[in-house]
Image: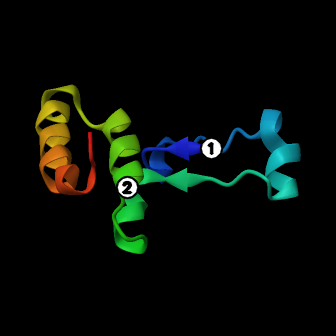
Amino acid sequence: MIFPSRGVDTGETQRYIELLDSQRVNRVYLDELTSTTESSLGIETVKLIVEPEDTATIKAREISKSWGKFISM
């Protein structure tokens, strides 16, 4: 389950309780990934989903500039 932050997680897990209890599914809070995880293209791309519309294009360009040298087209 992916959330932009813990504040958005309502805790309503009744539908997913079996998966959460089995530990096959975890909660991921995108705003916490930067402090605990090395930056990656995949994570930065997923974080664009919750980026405000007015800054998403700028952020996407920054990601492209930063990671462009590692991506061959």
Q: Position of residue 8 (x, y in %)?
A: 48, 41
Residue in the picture at 62% in, 53% down: 27
Q: In this view, does 67 lie to the left or right of 65?
A: right
Which quadrant is the C terminus positioned in? top left
At label 1, the amino acid type is Met
Q: What element carries label 1?
A: loop
Q: What element carries label 2?
A: helix
Q: Where is residue 9 in the image (x, y as percent from the top left)?
A: 56, 44
Which quadrant is the N terminus positioned in? top right
Q: How far apart are marks 2 and 1 (CA)?
A: 14 Å
At label 2, the amino acid type is Asp
Mark 1, residue position: 1
On screen, residue 12 above or below 70: above
Mark 2, residue position: 31
State which quadrant residue 16 falls in: top right
Residue in the picture at 88% in, 45% down: 18
Instruction: Specify which label sits upstream in the sequence, 2 or 1.
Output: 1
Q: Where is residue 45 in the image (x, y as percent from the top left)?
A: 35, 43
Q: Which residue lies furthest to the front in this view?
A: 73
Residue in the picture at 42% in, 70% down: 37
Residue in the picture at 33% in, 50% down: 44
Nearer to the camera, 66 or 34: 66
The tally of labels here is: 2
Q: Are marks 2 and 1 in contact (CB under 8 Å)?
A: no
Q: Is residue 65 left or right of residue 46?
A: left
On screen, residue 9 above or below 57: below
